[in-house]
Image (spheres, rainbow, N blue to C red):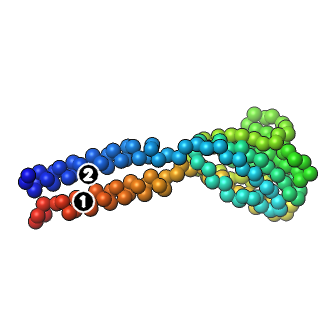
Amino acid sequence: MSSNSRWLTVVAGAVGLLVVGALLLPSLLRPKPVDRTITVEAQKYGYTPAVIKVNKGDRITLRFKAKDVTHGFFLEGYDLDGKARPEMPSFWVRRPSTGEDFHPVDEITFVADREGKFRYRCSTTCGYMHPFMQGEMIVAPNRLFPVSILLALVTTVFTLLWFARPEGK
């Protein structure tokens, strides 16, 4: 086999490997949706947890509790507004876009169906630092692992191409 035909074979194999990896890897390594139960506790002037990280497609069951005074929980982008009092085991929730009034629930369930960063903030005045009481929910697919695998494949292919190139080129 001549060095040019060997070179073409290596290049064709490398391109094929990259195409297959680029097409199959993201779908194979996409995290499966899971059920998550998250309890958000509010106290002057913050939330615990301050950051909620979930993957797209996860089914979130949210429980909301106030520790000291009445607090609100408005989740931007998900049409969810809640209110909790410290002496009550349940909290009140409403969907602002539908015009419905608050009704008591023990928990609310929704699907994190949009990627991005969504702020949640207190929607009930709870003191002088109330405007700064906020947190965030980050909804993202786990892209770090598939991207790192793809980068490793690309590095391997280009290393093979470098060492397999014909003499004098």
Residue at 61% in and 44% down: 34
Q: Return the x and y of residue 92 as percentages of the image width and height.
A: 84, 43
Picture quarter containing residue 128? bottom right
Residue 135 in view, yes or no: yes
Q: Is residue 26 above or below residue 169?
A: above
Residue under numbered circle 2: 14
Residue pictured at 82% horizontal, 40% vertical: 105
User: Dot 1 lies on which element?
Assistant: helix
Quick check: 155 left or right of 99? Answer: left
Where residue 33 appears, as percent x and y from the top left, is: 58, 42
Q: How many marks?
A: 2
Binning the other alpha carbons within 10 Å of mark 1 as few (below 14), some (14 to 19) or many (20 upward) gives some
For residue 145, the mark is none
How far across and down, in percent of the image, does residue 6 sit? Answer: 14, 53
Quadrant the C terminus occupies: bottom left
Q: Amino acid at mark 1?
A: Leu
Three-letter amino acid code at disc 2? Ala
Q: Earlier in the sequence, mark 2 or mark 1?
A: 2
Work out whether residue 123 can be spotted. Answer: no
Q: In the figure, residue 97 lies in which quadrant?
A: top right
Judged from this view, the residue extending furthest toward the right is 87
The residue indicated by pointer 1 is 160
* Residue found at x 86% / y 61%: 127
Q: Can you give x and y, in whole percent of width and height, for residue 25 in the image?
A: 41, 47
Q: Tell me whether circle 2 and circle 1 mark residues in contact (CB < 8 Å).
A: yes
Q: Secondary structure at mark 2?
A: helix
Q: Taking 17 as reference, is 90 left or right?
A: right
Q: Is residue 17 left or right of residue 64?
A: left
Residue at the extreme bottom of the image, as rendered: 168
The crowd level at tag 2 (other Cα within 10 Å; few <14, some 14-19, many 20+) is some
